[in-house]
Image (cartoon, rainbow, N blue to C red):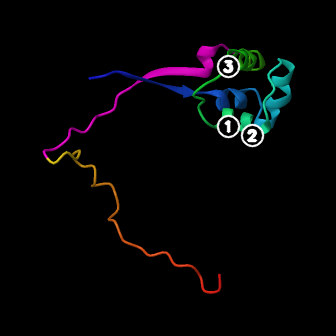
Amino acid sequence: MLKRMGFEWNLRRLMADQGMYQTTDLVPRLAEYGVHLSREQVFRLVTQPPQRLSMDALAALCGILGCSPADLITVREVRRQVAKPTASGETAGSTASLPPLRRVRVRRPEGL
């Protein structure tokens, strides 16, 4: 079995511990550390686990929140059962969770 590593992104929880409940609270604080991100970028950084993060941004977040990178990121092993293919090439149970397919016809409204 292949081992796969995953992580939990704890930025939102650490912000709440510091009394910061709005993502826009981070924009000026990051700018103090020389990290200039838009409000939208900061919103995504807080609400979604990042796939890439610059070391400058990570260091700034640690400085703002008074934490270490280990507090922001919790690494864990992901155990996922892999379905074995059947003789027909499909994976067992792959269609059990899907709704039945229906053929539909899309029509334009009259007059367009």
Decide whether residue 86 is among the magenta residues. Answer: yes
- Three-letter amino acid code at the position of disc 2: Glu
Q: Residue at x 76, y 36 (%)?
A: 23
Q: Residue 18 in the image: state x and y as whole percent.
A: 75, 26
Q: Residue 40 in the image: state x and y as whole percent.
A: 74, 40
> Which residue is at the front of the view, 22 or 91?
91
- Three-letter amino acid code at the position of disc 1: Arg
Is any atom of residue 22 visible in this view? no
- Among numbered discs 2 and 3, the one appearing first in the sequence: 2
In this view, the mark in front (3 or 1): 3
Q: Residue 100 in the image: state x and y as whole percent.
A: 32, 65
- Farthest-out residue, bottom: 110
Q: Residue at x 44, y 76 (%)?
A: 105
> Which residue is at the front of the view, 90 or 107?
107
Decide whether residue 7 is among the magenta residues. Answer: no
Q: Which residue is mark 1?
A: 44
Q: Where is 96 relative to 112, above or below?
A: above
Mark 1: secondary structure:
helix
Q: Residue at x 72, y 38 (%)?
A: 43
Mark 1 burial class by Cα count in 10 Å: few <14, some 14-19, many 20+:
few
Specify whether 106 is left or right of 90: right
Q: Which residue is mark 3?
A: 54
Whole-Å distance between the Cαs marked 2 and 3? Answer: 17 Å
- Three-letter amino acid code at the position of disc 3: Ser
Q: Which residue is mark 2?
A: 40
Mark 3 burial class by Cα count in 10 Å: few <14, some 14-19, many 20+:
few
Q: Which residues are magenta?
A: 67-87
Is any atom of residue 33 visible in this view? yes
Whole-Å distance between the Cαs marked 2 and 1? Answer: 6 Å
Q: Quadrant of the C terminus?
A: bottom right
Q: Residue 20 in the image: state x and y as whole percent.
A: 77, 32
